[in-house]
Image: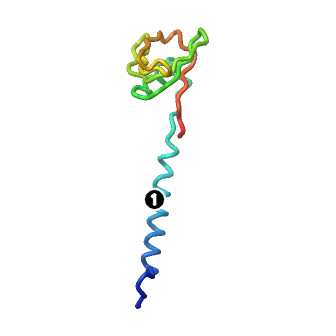
Amino acid sequence: MKHARGIIPRRSIQVSVLACVLMVFTALPLSAEELQPDVNAADTIKQTLDQQVGKRAKVKLRSGHELDGKVLKVGSNGVHLAELTGMEYFDAVIRLEAIDAVIVRVRK
């Protein structure tokens, strides 16, 4: 089979289409992986924060205030947040019992 210069052979098109289809199907399971906190656990707040170490999270305090920052460390009684939004030069240590909710990003 001869083909003129500048015309893409049919075989090349088929291989390209197959490669694109494979890329789409291999990427689908990655987008379905989302954080699903276990709300039946006794220490849900602590476990959720443990899963967020190194990531950003927002904590809603019983006082009504919210703090948004990077979770550095979670201890048995508190959490250390760094790089607080709006207060980038400050860190916070918060008692776990003072936290009503943990708000995390699970989808992009």
Please identify the quadrant where the N terminus is shown: bottom left
Question: In this figure, what is the number of numbered marks?
Answer: 1
Residue at image mark 1: 23
Q: Residue at x 40, y 91 (%)?
A: 2
Taking 104 as reference, is 8 left or right?
left
The three-letter code of the residue at mark 1 reads Met
Taking 81 as reference, is 42 left or right?
right
Q: x, y percentage for residue 11?
A: 43, 79
Q: x, y percentage for residue 18?
A: 46, 68
Q: x, y percentage for residue 88?
A: 44, 20
Q: Residue furthest right?
A: 64
Q: Residue at x 49, y 63 (%)?
A: 21
Name the one closer to the observer, 91 or 80: 91
In the rendered view, would you say 61 is above or below 10? above
Taking 2 as reference, is 21 left or right?
right
Q: Secondary structure at mark 1?
A: helix
Q: Residue furthest bottom?
A: 1
Q: x, y percentage for residue 31?
A: 51, 46
Disc 1 residue crowd, few under 14, some 14–19, many 20+, Cα 10 Å: few
